[in-house]
Structures are given as C-alpha cells and as structure tokens.
Amino acid sequence: MSESTNSAQTNLTREIAALGHWFHNLHLPDGTQTAPDHTLGDFPAYKWKYLAQHIPADLRGWRALDIGCNAGFYTFELAKRGATVTGIDSNQQYLEQALWAAQQYKLEERVTFRRMQVYDLAYSSEAYDLVLFMGVFYHLRYPTLALDIVAQMVKRMMVFQTLTMPGKEVYTDTDGLDIESREPMLEAGWPKMAFIEHRFAGDPTNWWAPNHACVEAMLRASGLRVAKALPHELYLAEPDPEHPSSVATWNREEILSATGANGHGNHQ
C-alpha cells in the first residue's frame, strides 16, 4: 500500500469517526467499513442478501422510497441498480452520515435525503414504484396509521419488516363472529399484536410486536397483497386493486382527520 493510499484511508477513518456512532455498516468503495465491529455482525448486509434476489436487478426508471433510511445502506443498493431513491429519517445524525456516504459512492444524483417522520408522508401526493418500510413499524406509537399512509403510496412493491412475536401459525376463520364469540382470539394464530409498555432490548421506542398472522392481516387490510414472507421478518407485498383498503374507500374521512389532511390541522 502506497503512502498516499494509506493517508487517504486514515483520513476516511477519521471522517467516519467524526460522524459518530454508525448503525449501518457500509462497505465503502475502497473497502473501508463504517461499523466493522457491529454487535449484529455485518448489518444490514446479511438481511440484504435475502432480499436482493427478490428485487429487480434493473431498477432504471423506478422511483423508490426508503422509510427510516438510517445511513442509507438500502437507499444506495437501490440506487446502484438504477433507481431514483428518496430516503427519509427523523434522526439528523443518520442523515448526515447518509449524505456523506452518498458522496463516497458518487450517487448524489440518484439519491435524496429528507428529515421527516413517516406520518409526514400523509401530506405528500407522490407515489413510488418501490417502498421499503423496514425496521420502523414497531417503533411507532401509531403503527397502523403509518401503514395506511404508506400503503397508499405504493405503485408496484413494498418491502415490510418488523419485530414480530414467535410463531408462524395462522388462524383463518376470523370472519363473521358475533360479539360473544371471543375465544378464538386466544388461538395461537389469531392476528394479534403485543404492546410493550416498558423498555424492550433497552429501547424505549420498541412499542409493538405483531405475530406473523397479524402482519399479513394488516398488510391485506391496508390494500396490499402479501406476495411472499422471507427470512428475517421480511414481507413482500404489492397493491391489490380487488381488495382496496378502507381508507381508500368507505373510511376515507378517518385518515384525513387523523392526519389533519382534511384541512382542519395546522401542519407546517
């Protein structure tokens, strides 16, 4: 290794350290990693290897949205495939890391980063061919509101991931019960979501853990068809025109009121 190369890597390492703690271990073009000693291993690359084969290799002409983009690992992977990608996150430090990393990958023209809450998407009229909604749902106080907002923006495909309860059972006979028939709700595969009152894994923002049946049911209820469940709590979904969400049909007024998009809110 030449002296100039060694000096460049030293400077790169210093810049990485100056940007603070990294949750995404990015593999930069010269081989430098942003979090090589990550407690979760090579995160999130090990999740991407399961997902990558289910996303088109050629995304030229696609517009993508990465919700909770963090330092931009998935944003950059989609951009490398040709997509124009918007990454949103509420954490300014992560966005600064992502902006810096975009320069290292020379992807500035393909990616845009915005500091936003997922609920802010209710005020956007944009739609996206591909939406990544990963690692965010269980951190939200109002999760199904967020899912309803996001689902309406999906044109082709959504990748959904959340912390889940153990088990893959699905209790299918959930329709048409009367108000006294509640015992089936106790069955293992009834769609249900555990509420976490106190810290879980040391994180006070871990609020929810749906079971597998609940994830699929919520996606269907938001107007999406579940195409496939993958390892690492990943789900592929796509719009289902034959079974649209209630917020797109008879219950539109509720989501407009909940988000202030009915004109009565004071969104800035």
Image: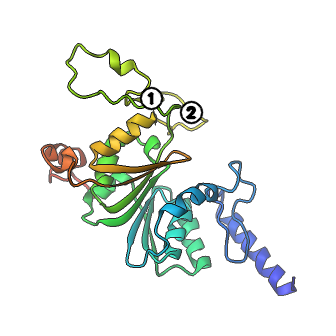
Q: Tag 2: residue type?
A: Phe
Q: Which residue is mark 1?
A: 194
In the depicted structure, whether residue 169 falls above or below residue 42: above
The quadrant in which residue 85 appears is bottom left
Q: Are marks 2 and 1 in contact (CB under 8 Å)?
A: no
Q: Position of residue 96 (x, y in %)?
A: 55, 66
Q: Earlier in the sequence, mark 2 or mark 1?
A: 1
Q: Is residue 188 left or right of residue 105?
A: left
Q: Tag 1: residue type?
A: Ala
Q: What is the secondary structure assignment of the residue under circle 1?
A: strand
Residue at horizontal 35%, vertical 21%? 185
Residue at horizontal 82%, vertical 86%? 4
Residue at horizontal 44%, vertical 29%? 195
Q: Nearer the viewer, residue 155 or 103?
A: 155
Q: Is residue 243 left or right of residue 141?
A: left
The quadrant in which residue 181 appears is top left
Residue density around tag 2, few if under 14, some if 14–19, many if 20 or more, within 10 Å: few
Q: Which residue is mark 2?
A: 200
Label 2 vs label 1: CA separation? Answer: 12 Å
Residue at horizontal 59%, vertical 72%? 101
